[in-house]
Amino acid sequence: MTRAPHGGPGRISGDGAVVARAPAKVNVHLAVAPLGHDGYHELRTVFLAVSLFDTVTVRPAGELTIDVTGPFAGGRTGPDRVPTDRRNLVWQAAELLADRAGVPAAAAITIDKSIPAAAGLAGGSADAAAALVALDTLWGTHATRGELADLAARLGSDVPFSLLGGVALGSGRGERLSPVLARRPWHWVLGIAGSGLSTPAVYGELDRLRADGRLPSGEELPSPDPVVAALHGGPVDALAAALHNDLQEPAIALRPQLRRALDAATAAGAAGALVSGSGPTVAALAADEDDAVALAAELAGTGQFRTVRAVHGPVPGARLVG
Ligand code: ATP
């Protein structure tokens, strides 16, 4: 592997720890094609990285271990528990990088979760992207950003965007990215409505609703152009009007409370609101930062949300901290 532009020995602290963080994402446009013969759906999406970050700390160790801490670690047991074994995307990221670089996959990894799991915010993908960046420095594997992007695409379709950050148009399964320009920050309130929703279950519900004729077939994908043009720097109402998510109706069908949560966002004065990815997070668009703070306070009082956070985006993708 060749020399890295994003890391170096200077980032390793006294106890040998390397720290990286990566952002959550909101899909401000998500168009889903009909189920393909390969069992996957082609996507046309616009990703926006927002200022809610998971932090991954890696230390030298004789074997690979993962510990999960923070407000969304999900407890030690129960359905929301974030796995600490091979099922964790960070574990898979470590094995993949080690294998590619020909080094032992050994590190003590701590994931500090501020991004709720299974919330449609790509928290697991953010962790995997941050782990790639941190371990590359810890192990001195010196991957280029392009090499890390190749590994990211093998880990999951949202991982390349977690690495890149900013705003990007995604195609394929979301892993083929073209950066998009946003000339101003956009302010949002993320409202997490209830416990996690399974992404495969939401896609399955979309297929069922389409087969029953209750939703359009998806043969003609809506264009991302309006949302790309609005993100570029237009008025907030233009972006609000352009927001689109084909997974919103199936997510509502599985979790009817989401309809009330979206209505609560609009009633509280959001310029627009949509379900983020496969849900159950609602992303409510605010006019500016002050408006986002007021909207967050209002939404926290509605009783519709487990957690409410004011964020802004675009922000950069996975980066070393410190
Ligand atoms: P996706 O579309 O990938 O399902 P999401 O944002 O809805 O995205 P994630 O937070 O990425 O969901 O988690 C989805 C599932 O992946 C979780 O239920 C969990 O079991 C598993 N998972 C694996 N690694 C992680 C991780 N580091 N953090 C959170 N969940 C993880």
Image (cartoon, helix red, strand yellow):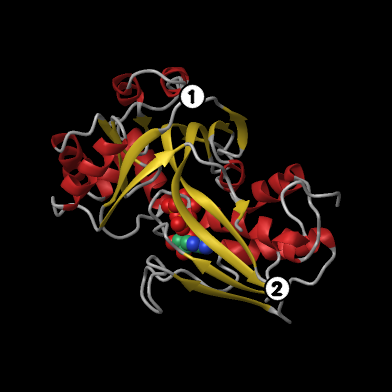
Residue 7 image position (x, y, % from top left): 73, 54
When the figure is inspected, residue 152 is found, relative to residue 35, above or below; the finding is below
Which residue is under mark 2?
16
Helix, strand or loop for disc 1: loop
Q: Are marks 1 and 2 in contact (CB under 8 Å)?
A: no
Residue 109 image position (x, y, % from top left): 61, 71
Front in this rendered view, residue 198 or 210: 198
When the figure is inspected, residue 122 is found, relative to residue 80, above or below; the finding is above
Using residue 244 as the reference point, say whether residue 317 is left or right of it: right
Check mark 2 vs ligand 1: CB closer than 8 Å? yes or no.
no
Query: Which label is found at residue 159?
Result: none
Query: Which label is found at residue 183?
Result: 1
Check mark 1 vs ligand 1: CB closer than 8 Å? yes or no.
no
Residue at 76 percent across and 46 percent down: it is 5
Residue at 54 percent across and 36 percent down: it is 166
Mark 1 Cα-neighbour bin, 10 Å: few <14, some 14–19, many ≥20 = few
